[in-house]
Image (cartoon, rainbow, N blue to C red):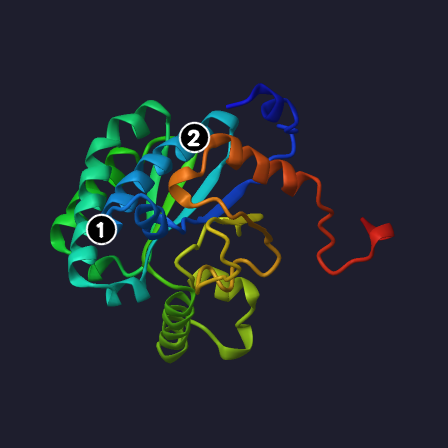
Amino acid sequence: MKETVRNEIDYTKLPEHIAITMDGNGRWAKQKGNIRLVGHQKGVSTVSDIVTAAAEIGIKYLTLYTFSTENWNRPQDEVSGLMNLLISASEKNLEKLLKNNVKLLTIGDFESLPTKVRESLQKAIDKTAGNTGLTLILAISYSGQWDITQMVKSIAKDCKDGQLNIDEISQETIQNHLSTKGIPNPELLIRTSGEYRISNFLLWQIAYTELYFTDVLWPDFTKEEFLNAIKDFQNRQRRFGKVDNQI
């Protein structure tokens, strides 16, 4: 990583929570004349690099859009390959997570995952539960609409059971019934590969998140690119509905 980029970052004003839509693995593989799974394999290597970079500079939360609910509709061989990659990556990188004091969590429809994937991820979650550095959140079998649907069902059940009065429902109530309960909303969302979409990711949580888009495909996304996104974030003025002279 270039020292000039490191030196341009204000480490006292880092975003507490960064979310990333890791896009472009398939196109990267196609450009190289390979099958899509090769791109996903290279993407796993990029994940390791970016998690290490985030932990090193002191980011507190990093959420990675790993596998969406819509991704189940991809060809079966690609889905199976991705599930196997989740198993191998969680096992291979467990010691690195422990070494870097990274705590692992997941959000999404965990029960929809194959048994071996759940067991492998749960092992990593349990082993890293006591870590106090970066919290790495993998959004797996996740979508923002799924999250909101589950939230509505949960609140409706509480109302039906007499645990919650409908007049008491607030934004805080909603926040506490989402899968990200206890996790601050992301301040920065990065999307790679030149696509300008949210793609059903953290729809409630990104209401005031700064968006950063780059043409770089995820397998080519480096620590330097990561720091460039943070530098861009630090050059923005976040008003939250206010005018300049109120900031």
**Residue 164, placed above or below residue 21:** below
Residue extending farthest to the top is 3
**Quadrant location of residue 177?**
bottom left
**What's under tag 2, amino acid-wise?**
Gly
Image position, residue 217 (x, y; %): 43, 45
Q: Earlier in the sequence, mark 1 or mark 2?
A: 1
Viewer-nearest residue: 95 or 73: 73
Image height of 67 relative to 69, above or below? above
SS type, badge 2: loop
Q: Quadrant of residue 4?
A: top right
Residue 93 % position (x, y): 26, 32
The x, y position of residue 148, in whole percent, is: 43, 69
Do the CB atoms of the residues marked 1 and 2 lie less than 8 Å apart?
A: no
Residue beneath disc 1: 82
Horizontal side of residue 56 vs 5, given as left or right: left
Q: Which residue matches tag 2?
A: 133
- Residue 43 at what x, y percent from top left? 33, 41
- How many numbered tags mark residues here? 2
* Picture residue at 48% right of the left edge, 44% below the top: 216
Task: Return the residue found at the far left.
Answer: 116
- Foreground mark, 1 or 2, reads 1
Find the residue positioned furthest to the right: 245
Q: Is residue 22 above or below residue 11?
A: below
- Give the class, few, some or many, for how many residues have Cα within 10 Å of label 1's Cα (few <14, many ≥20): some
Q: Residue at x 25, y 68 (%)?
A: 73
Q: Nearer the viewer, residue 92 or 97?
A: 92
Disc 2 packing (10 Å; few <14; some 14–19; many ≥20): some
Type of the residue with mark 1 = Leu
* SS of the residue under disc 1: helix
Q: Residue at x 55, y 33 (%)?
A: 227
> Does residue 230 appear to the left or right of 88 in the view shown?
right
- Spatial separation of the CA atoms under disc 1 and disc 2: 27 Å
